Amino acid sequence: MINRQCIFVVFFSLIFLFIINFKIIDANDLCDVNNDDQTGVPEAVFALQVASGVKDISVIKTNRHSLDADDGSPEEALYVNSSGHVGVGTKNPTSDLDITGKLTKKLSGHVGVPSGSKIVTGVGTYFYSELNIGDSVLINKEKFLVSEIQSNNVLILDTPHQLGANNESIFSNVDLFSVKNGDSKEVFTINKTGYIGIGTNNPKVSLDVNGDVKLGDPVYYNYSESINVEGDGADKFFIEDSSCTIGVVKGAVFNHNSGDYPNQGAICCCLNASRGHGWFCWE
């Protein structure tokens, strides 16, 4: 049973603390309401919640390092362990921030869709700017793909909505990772498809770079006609190198042994072809 005298002492201590900013009685010297070895202001707040009926001491967690979702499910939706690692959707975070689950964002406005229909109508929505064809959306606990966007207020789902929805929020997947500079310009993005963008927030391929790319320092080769793959004047060179990794690209500079063709720039790619395993270079 809760010590009511303890609750009142803590209550009046808080009054002095917050009203006159002078703590006459130290809450840390008071008591431990639910025997979890924690006192002070957190315990004082807890004691007041119990006294007012907000918290039931018979079922209250002793763990002060987690927060439940607003509706109680899931429990411990946000968790901080003894190492300071923060878990979202997991009680066993292994890094500074460990997220388990899908990342979604709430879109503008509200939507409605009749049961058994694919047509979604919105109020205050901006489908053109906030969605793309093929995006995944969540409406009233059901997930769909966007098959068509007819206007800022009308879109078509890939399958009918079974439950239907009225004045519901609509959610969409978000980029997995994004970094902005001091001007709030996105300089690095991994989108929901897994594509990586450097200098662009809308990568279209596995690696989409908007800007210059430096492939390390160039490698210098001296050559004679014997390493020219084709004698068509196009200067395609092959440098045998069994240690190179297939698919790697690098820059190179070629100098003819005669001295007649100095500092010829080339792009080389490591391939394993009929000529051998090594660098195929094009000037």
Image: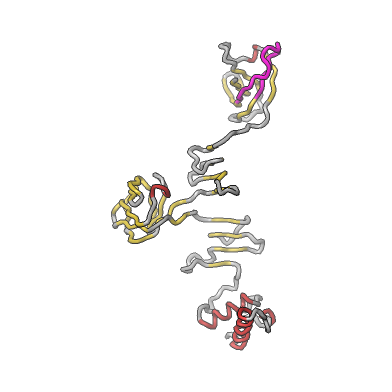
Tell me where the magenta segment starts and ends, as one range. Answer: 252-268
- In this image, 33 relative to 152: left or right? right
Quadrant for the C terminus, please: top right
Q: Position of residue 104 (x, y in %)?
A: 47, 54
Quadrant for the N terminus, please: bottom right
Q: Position of residue 271 (x, y in %)?
A: 59, 25
**Residue at 54%, 83% in the rendered image:** 51
Q: Position of residue 266 (x, y in %)?
A: 62, 22
- In this image, 226 relative to 165: left or right? right
Is 257 within the magenta?
yes
Here the colouring is secondary structure
Query: Where is residue 123, by image quadrant?
Result: bottom left
138 is higher (above) or lower (below) than 254: below
Q: Position of residue 212 (x, y in %)?
A: 59, 34
69 is higher (above) or lower (below) than 240: below
Query: Where is residue 211, by image quadrant?
Result: top right
Q: Between residue 124 and residue 135, name the one nearer to us.
A: 124
Query: Where is residue 264, by image quadrant?
Result: top right
Q: Between residue 6 and residue 170, name the one nearer to us.
A: 170
Q: How many marks?
A: 0
**Residue at 48%, 44% in the rendered image:** 193
Q: Between residue 222 and residue 163, name the one nearer to us.
A: 222
Is 230 within the magenta?
no
189 is higher (above) or lower (below) than 253: below
